[in-house]
Each structure stands twice: as structure tokens, then as C-alpha cells.
Amino acid sequence: MDYVYALVTQTGIHVLLGLSVYTVALTGQVSFGQQGFYAIGAYVSAIATVLWGVPLLPALLLGTVVSAFIGVMVGFPALRVKGLYLAIATFAFGEIVRNGLNILYVTREVNGIEVGPVGPEGFRHISYFNDNGWTAFEVMILVVAIVSVVLVIYALLERSRLGATVRAVGADELAAATAGINVVWIKVGAFAIGAAAAGLGGGLYAHYTTFLSPLAFGLSVAIIAVAYVLVGGLGSWLGPVAGVLFFLVLTEGLRFLGEYRMMIYGAVVVIAMNVRPYGLVDAKMVHLVKNLFRTGARGAREET
Amino acid sequence: MLGSLLDGFLFGFSYAMIGIGFTLIFGVMQKFNLAQGATALAGAYLGLALYRLTDQLAPSYVMFAVAVVGAGAIGWLIYQICFRFLPKEYELAPLMSTFGMLILIEEIISHLTDAQPFEFPNPLLYGAFEFADGEFILRHDYLLLAAMALAVVGMLYYLIFHTRLGLATRAVSERPVAAQLCGVMIDRVNEKIFILSAGIAGATGFMIAMTIGTIIPGLASVMTIKGLVVAVFGGLGSVPGAIIAGLILGMLEAGTAYMFNATIRDIVAYLVLFGVLIVRPTGLLGKRSLYQ
């Protein structure tokens, strides 16, 4: 059963990572730097619980807020840069964070052991769950609860005026600005929300794995986070969730292939993009499903 | 210090060449090919395979030719699989398909070589010009690398400004629709530019493997990142920009690595990239109209 608990927990954390890229992508930008916010959230909340003895939820909140704040600080200058240029600029940010963690030394003695991040050796003994006697099942419930709350917020926001505004900016900045939308505010806001989602995911990740290493926040995380969104689709918040599930099934389902696993993994991604270039849950599919629910099958047929 | 800067400058030509591969493709298609590093590496491995299959008899220039031609062929395949059937106006889809390709090629190479590093023959090993009692050392293989980069640039210049393909390329990169109306087959031009840039990647991969002396599958993603950074830093679509950016990056890395360590080197390199993009959102020599 522990295997299932671990899978669900990891999936929840990765959904947050996917949502973080998704939020930025809604404004028409791709960020390869969300793993930087993921790392910041992880380190900040872990430092809070381990070094300062803060309880878990305030620590997670702190990691989320710090990530969002840095998101605003980075977002303002960075969003001058557009398209694939922004993808590289944000990747540069992520690498700056990762390399910064390599020279981060904040250690302190707690209960007789030296704890805290030790540069490239990483951050050990993030034992909040263990110290407080949480079982793997309880950890899973916590992650599922937090992720569900976040997903409900996303679902509500998407149906709101704000959601429409964000999509308008993504579709055509100039037209959105003409319609009186403050484009800069929306873009920086989306960047900050995305950073917050990644920071929250990072905090959960830190306490779940109990050990952080700067190596865990490199290019592979950046690309997989973007892959969740691009393979999953940008049509709705279900897109990144579908993307995470797709890759989950792929990595777990291909285990029997042994050493050929990654090879097939690469090939499946190539094929997936050829079959559904706009992702699994694209705008067209969202439209189709919405019509089905709105007016029944007859309405959908009339539309086509 | 000056010696390491000089090394960095010369090695920067390899960065410049990878960057050129990215910038050429972006120039005509406005897309990235993340598998470029894998193409370069695959080319180098093909050259090495020939060397090992012929009991180490194959001379380096034949290996080089195999690397270039092999990489060109792989590039053609990547174009067919990852670009041809994807929507033209959506630049994010090929980002993922070529990422899948990067993993696929890297994994195939790992599998065939058991993920072991291989020694790469370097006929110019230890050859160097020395100046001022060994204060400055010019390695022969670095000089060859620089010479090759200059030759590639010269060839590109001729190709782009003095041939029909070049004319078509410039037309497609400036006004794709108008070019099509004038009878330019955009798919054909893209395909040719793709093969060209893959061939350049193969040459680069070969030279990098030769100067480093060993070759490992992990080099593929490293080369892709360096190429992206250089192409974006210099301005996408601009060949001179990629060269300047490659040389600056080479010197910056060598200088900071000499003064501090590898971590500081990477922080400085990415800070400079980030700063340059904020001040000039389209890179050093990028055209504003291209993307914005």
C-alpha cells in the first residue's frame, strides 16, 4: 500500500508544479524557471520547520509567500522579455537559484545534530513528519487535501471574470490592452500565482522526501513541468492534471521495460505531440465537452 | 588569467557554432530544436563508431566527414518526425516533440555504449604554440576549432547572400507568406536549412569531443543548453549575434572559473544572460520585428 500512497503524494506535488507552469502559460508565456520557485519554497519551508521549529502549515505558507514575492520581483523585469526569449530568461533564473543553493550554508545545532542546508551536500534531516509521528497515509491525505483546495480555487478562478481576463491577455495582448485590461498587472499577477503554486509544491516535496539537494532542481524538472502543461493541454486546469497523469502512467507503466524505459518514454512524447500537438485537453476538446453538458447531444450536433 | 581568457575565447567558437545551429532554424521557422545537442553528439559518436570499427585506422578527417553527414541525416529525420506534421504557427509543440527526441537519441546512445565514457582520438593532442615562456599557450586543436568555426561562417555567408537557397531563406525569414506567394516552397527551404544546421551541429559535436578527449551521452543536453543560451543571448536569427555571444560566454566562463569556481561561473553566466535580456529583450543583435 505504501507504494500507492507514495505515488498519490508525488502526483499531488507534481500537479502543483504543473499548475505553476500552466498559470504563466495562460498569459501566453512559457517559463522554464518554475523549478527555481519550487526550490525556494522547498528550502524556505524546510528551514522554517527544521531550524526555527515552526509548525508545518505556517512553514508551507511562508514558503509559498516568499516564492510569490520573489515571483513578483523577478516577474516585473522578466516579463519585458517575450516568447522563447522568456523561456530562456526564466531558465537562467532557475539556474541562478540552483547554483545559489550550491553555496548556501545555514547550519545550526538542533537536538544535538547539525542541521540545515550544506551547499552541494544538500539539506538533510527534514524530519517533521517522522518527528510528529505522521504515517505515509496521513501525509498522502494532507497532500491530497491541499492539492484539492488549490484545484477548486483554480476551477473557480477559471470561471470568473479574472480567468477570462487572463486568457484574453494570453490570446492577444494588444487587444486585451485596448479593452482596458492592465496587461502588466495580469502578467505579473499570473507569474506570482504560478510562483506561489510552485513554492507550495516545493514545501510539500521537501517534507515528503526529507532530503533536498540542489541537483533535484535542474533542467529535468524544468522540462518535465513544462511537459505536463504542453502534453496535457492549455484548455482548462484539467490539462496539467491530465499531463501529470499521462507521465505518471508512462513512467510507472513502462517499468517492465527496464533499461529501455527512458527510450520508449522519449518516443511516446514525440508521438503524443504528433497526435495531439495542442495537448490532451486543448481548447477544442473543452469546447466540445462544454457543449455536451450545456445543451445535450442535439445541441452539440447542431454546432458542428 | 590572460591564458585562460584566451582558451575561453577559442573554446567559445564551439559555443558560437552550436548557437548558429539554433539561430539558423529559428530564423526560418521561429522554433527551437531541443534535439540539436543530441544531433551533435550522435554525429560525434558515428565518427567514433567508424574509428572503432576500422580498428582505429580511420583518419580523423574521414571521421569528421562521417560525423557531419551522419548528423545531417539525423537532422533530416528530426525534421520529418518532430516538425513536418505539427502545426506551423504553434512554436510550443515542437519544443516538446524535440525534447522527446533528445531523450530518445540520448538513451539510444547510452544503451549502445552501456553509458560508458569513450576516449575520443585527438591527433593534435599536446600540440601547442607557446609564447612568453609558456605564459600563453595556444592549443592546436583549439586553433583548428576556431578556424573551422570561421570557415563555417564564411560558408554560411556565401550560402545566404550568394545562392538561390540563401535568397529563399532570407525571403522566408522576413515574410513567409509573401515568399510562398512568390513560389518559394517553405517546407523545402526549412528542410534544407534544417539539414544544414544539423551538419554544423555534427561538426561542432566532433570538435568538442575531440578537444575534451572523452565523450559521454550526457553531453547532449549540455550542448543543447549552451546552444540555446548563446542563440538567445546573441539574438535569435542573427548569425553574427551568435558568434559574439559564443565568444563572450566562452571568455566569461573561463575568466570566472579561473578567479572563483564552477558554481560562481554558472551564476555569473546566467546573471549576465538574464541582465542582457532585460535590457535588450531580443538579445544583443536580435531584430525586434522578428518575434514581437
Image (spheres, coloured by chain):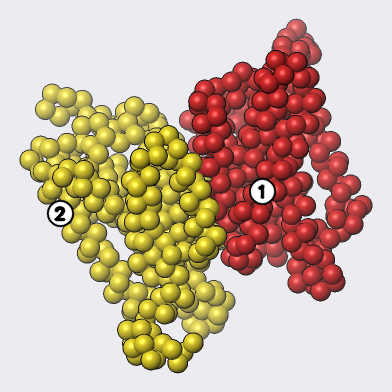
The amino acid at mark 1 is Leu
Q: At 72% across and 37% down in the image, what residue appears? A: B70
Q: Which chain is yellow?
A: A
Q: In the shown orientation, is residue A140 left or right of residue B80?
A: left
Mark 2 touching mark 1, by CB under 8 A?
no
- The numbered dot on residue B77 is 1
Q: Is residue B127 above or below residue B169?
A: above
Viewer-closest of B230 and A77: B230
Q: Quadrant of the N terminus of chain A?
A: top left
Q: Which chain is red?
A: B
Residue A210 screen position, x and y as percent: 23, 37
Q: Under tag 1, what secondary structure?
A: helix
Labels 2 and 1 share a subunit: no
Residue A101 screen position, x and y as percent: 38, 36
Q: Which residue is mark 2?
A: A141
Q: Under tag 2, what secondary structure?
A: helix
Quadrant position of residue B102:
top right
- Determine the CA span between mark 2 and mark 1: 47 Å
Q: At 48% across and 82% down in the image, what residue appears? A: A180
